[in-house]
Amino acid sequence: MMSDPLTQTKAALKVFFTAVREWELTEHQARTLLNISPDVYQQYKKGITDPPSDDVCARLALLTLIYGSLKQLYSDKNIGLWLKNPSKEDSPWKGASPLDTMLTDHTGMVMVHAYLNQLKGDG
C-alpha cells in the first residue's frame, strides 16, 4: 500500500534538509533549489502540514534522487567537492559547478540527475 502524498513529501523534505546540512548550503541556496520564499522555507523546516505545489514536489523528487546517487558514487567528503567545484569548459556544466547548474532552474537539476545516472550506469 502506498503512503499518502503528505507522508511522502515529509520524507522527501527530511532528505532535503539532510542534504542542505551535509552539502553546507546556505538558506538562499536551499530556497532556490525548491523555488520557495523565506516564509515557506521556514514553514517546511517546522514541519509541513499542507501538500506543496507540483513544482516543489517535482524538485524534491529530483533532489532526493540526486542525493541518493551522490551517496552511491562518492564519499561524504567528496560529495561537497564534486558539487561545488567549477567544471571544465567542455563538461556538461560548461565551467560552472554542478551545484550552480542545479541552482539555475529545474532543467539544471534534471541535467545533474541525468549525468549522475550515466555515471552509475543507469542512463
Image (tube, grey):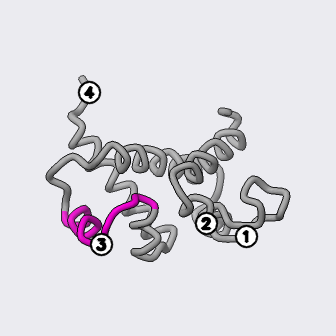
Badges 1 and 4: C-beta atoms under 8 Å apart?
no
Task: Please name whichever residue, 10 or 49, is drawn nearer the observer in this view of the structure.
Answer: 49
Residue assigned mark 1: 86
- Mark identifier at residue 2: 4
Q: Say left or right for 100 vs 29.
A: right
Quarter location, residue 82: bottom right
Secondary element at image label 2 = helix
Q: Earlier in the sequence, mark 3 or mark 4?
A: 4
- Residue at 82%, 64% (x, y): give it: 88
Q: Earlier in the sequence, mark 2 or mark 3?
A: 3
Secondary element at image label 4 = loop
Tell me the quadrant of the picture where the C terminus can be found. Answer: top right
Tell me how far mark 1 sits from mark 2, CA to CA: 9 Å
Mark whose residue sits in front, 1 or 3 = 3
Residue assigned mark 3: 38
Q: Earlier in the sequence, mark 1 or mark 2?
A: 1
